[in-house]
Image: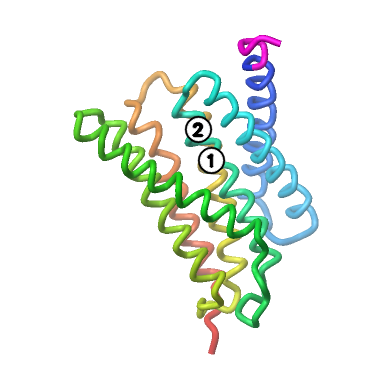
């Protein structure tokens, strides 16, 4: 099988999985949270984003596409850790974190540092795409630092696992929406298209985090 044929097959998988994730994510963001239907739709979102992310990473290796790499890495990390946190409810009570949790966080840390360094280099060479890389890089590193703190049972928020689940799933949805906008954008400047979903949807993270947060006494 030629690399071009493999790329086309991966592209089809990438588009189908991404569409499933985007549709499922839109439904769950706009409807009631926490019921059985929410959880079932959430599984479609989870697996859609994971398949979409892995397909994107393999495609980025074939054609050296930084866009696909960034979206792929974020999709996998956000969706996977968002789901994993539902199984980490008792960390503050001494529950051990699984190896997969550390692997996901360390992977994101390495990519986050790489995004920051490469973004700085691009800006130094007057390439405004460096702004995008810096934003995503700093966001990555901040999330990983939160992971490390949580894994050590140092969170004072009683239901931190729920808040991180919400934050990461919306973050994964932002990655999907960003990919859709960037690919189909014909009007906005490139940097704006990359950052617009983050700017629009991030307030939802703060809104729902504040709504559901329970501080330990």
For label 1, count other residues whose C-alpha is less than 10 Å away and answer few (under 14), some (14-19) or many (20+). Answer: many
For label 2, count other residues whose C-alpha is less than 10 Å away and answer few (under 14), some (14-19) or many (20+). Answer: many
Q: As drawn, is 185 to the left or to the right of 77?
A: left
Q: Position of residue 87 (x, y in %)?
A: 71, 65
The answer to whether residue 80 is above or below residue 72 is below
**Quarter of image, res 203:** bottom left
Q: As drawn, is 125 to the left or to the right of 90?
A: left
The answer to whether residue 11 is above or below residue 168 is above
Q: Which mark is residue 69?
A: 2
Q: Position of residue 100 (x, y in %)?
A: 65, 56
Q: Are marks 2 and 1 in contact (CB under 8 Å)?
A: yes
Residue found 42% across the figure and 47% down from its top: 112
Which residue is nearer to you in this view: 98 or 182?
A: 98
Q: Position of residue 121 (x, y in %)?
A: 25, 35
Q: Is residue 208 visible?
A: yes
Task: Please identify the residue farthest to the bottom as the structure is shown.
Answer: 217
**Label 2 secondary element:** helix
Residue designated by label 1: 73
Residue found 59% across the figure and 54% down from its top: 103
**Label 1 secondary element:** helix
Between the residue at mark 2 and the residue at mark 1, the CA separation in whole angstroms equals 6 Å
Q: Position of residue 200 (x, y in %)?
A: 43, 45
Q: Main secondary structure of the magenta part?
A: helix
Residue found 50% across the figure and 66% down from its top: 148
Q: Is residue 30 visible?
A: no
Magenta extent: 1-6
């Amino acid at each position: 099988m030629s690399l071009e044929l493999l790329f086309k097959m991966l592209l089809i998988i990438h588009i189908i999985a991404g569409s499933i994730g985007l549709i499922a994510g839109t439904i769950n963001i706009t409807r009631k949270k926490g019921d059985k239907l929410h959880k079932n739709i959430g599984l479609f979102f989870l697996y859609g984003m994971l398949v979409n992310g892995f397909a994107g990473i393999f495609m980025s290796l074939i054609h050296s596409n930084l866009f696909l790499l960034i979206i792929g890495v974020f999709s996998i990390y956000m969706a996977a850790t968002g789901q994993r946190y539902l199984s980490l409810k008792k960390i503050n009570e001494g529950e051990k974190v699984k190896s997969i949790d550390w692997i996901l966080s360390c992977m994101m840390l390495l990519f986050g540092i790489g995004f920051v360094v490469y973004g700085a280099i691009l800006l130094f060479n007057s390439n405004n795409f460096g702004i995008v890389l810096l934003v995503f890089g700093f966001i990555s590193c901040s999330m990983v630092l939160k992971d490390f703190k949580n894994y050590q049972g140092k969170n004072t928020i009683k239901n931190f696992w729920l808040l991180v689940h919400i934050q990461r799933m919306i973050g994964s949805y932002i990655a999907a929406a960003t990919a859709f906008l960037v690919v189909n954008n014909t009007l906005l400047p490139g940097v704006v298209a990359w950052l617009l979903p983050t700017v629009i949807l991030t307030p939802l993270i703060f809104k729902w985090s504040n709504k559901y947060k329970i501080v330990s006494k």
